[in-house]
Image (cartoon, rainbow, N blue to C red):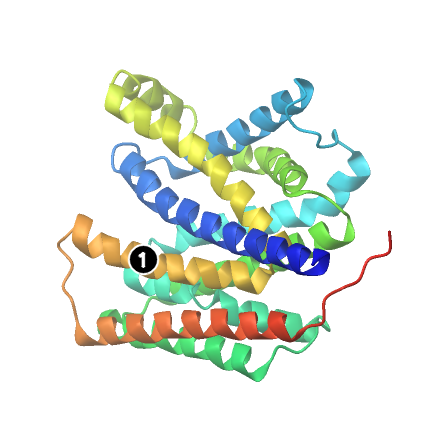
Amino acid sequence: MDILGDSDKNSYRSLSAAVSYGIASMAMVFLNKAVLMQYSHSMTLLTLQQLATTLLIHFGRSMGYTKSKGLDMQTAKRILPVSLFYNANVAFALASLKGVNIPMYIAIKRLTPLAVLIAGFFSGKARPTTQVILSVLLTAAGVLVAALGDFSFDLIGYSMAFTSVFFQTMYLVLVEKSGAEDGLTSIEIMFYNSFLSLPFLLFLIIATGEFPDSLSLLFAKSNSFSFLVIFLLSLVMGIVLNFTMFLCTIVNSALTTTIVGVLKGVGSTTLGFVILGGVEVHALNVTGLVINTAGGVWYSYAKYQQKKSKPPKLTST
């Protein structure tokens, strides 16, 4: 009975982590869009979100609200590649949007699960089941079909987008490895990632010319109560998103996290048609989204069957 109870708790934790990340990620898309419609300095926004995360965790630890460990330089050195890949992913993603339209950008980013699968193969990770492999391929195929109606080509933009996929893949794989091998909690990884991101992001906003005009505009915009509320919500949701993403990756896997991201993209696209309007619906787009969703559902079923077939682990007391 105890073994069954532990199994149920682990399954519930895995499911809740995946669902929480999906909801937070979807909400973040619309909050960021709402902010950026009035405040176009995206790198400054990202810097402030990371700063808010760092300060919240630091003061939370100082006041005893969290039991996470303090800053350790040896650990920081191990986590540094995670932070670098994270920021490189964001930087190349933003750069790609200058030459690639939104539907094609989303389509390329949704190829991350396939890249994670390939990275796992070359890193010596256990081979996934045939159903897992086929479901990820089906998800990627759905993405390509959905993008055919809006296919356009910009060599620099496409190069940036695919490079972003590479960095996102390495980032997710390293997060999973850091949580498993270094014994760090999701809050601790989130703190190190945010803290180590700040010098890189500060350099970017200065080098790109966003600073100091971005802060002047932010202070001017803060006179609007509606903007201030949306902006503060985006800061809070940035913290929630980072926490749920790290938690989902540690509790489940990098592949599960990216699949949840793919399904979130489907939900965001669907809501975008309803909320934003002005988007022409093509048969290929709808067909691709259906295939993409079917791949995600198939993957969930395959992972459930895989976990169900594993014998429960006995722990000595």
Q: How far across and how far down the image is residue 193, in percent? A: 62, 40
Quadrant containing the N terminus is bottom right
Residue 228 in view (yes/no): yes
Specify the quadrant of the image occupied by residue 225: top left
Q: How far across and how far down the image is residue 185, in percent? A: 68, 42
Return the residue at label 1. Answer: 267
| In the depicted structure, whether residue 35 falls above or below residue 157 | above
Q: Dot 1 surroundings within 10 Å: few (below 14), some, or many (20 or more)?
A: some
Task: Tally the marks.
Answer: 1
Specify the quadrant of the image occupied by residue 297: bottom left
**Amino acid at pointer 1:** Gly
Callout 1: helix, strand or loop?
A: helix
The residue at the point 56 percent across, 58 percent down is 167
Q: How far across and how far down the image is residue 247, in percent? A: 59, 48
Residue 99 in view (yes/no): no
Horizontal side, residue 94 vs residue 163: left or right? left
| In the depicted structure, whether residue 9 falls above or below residue 104 | above
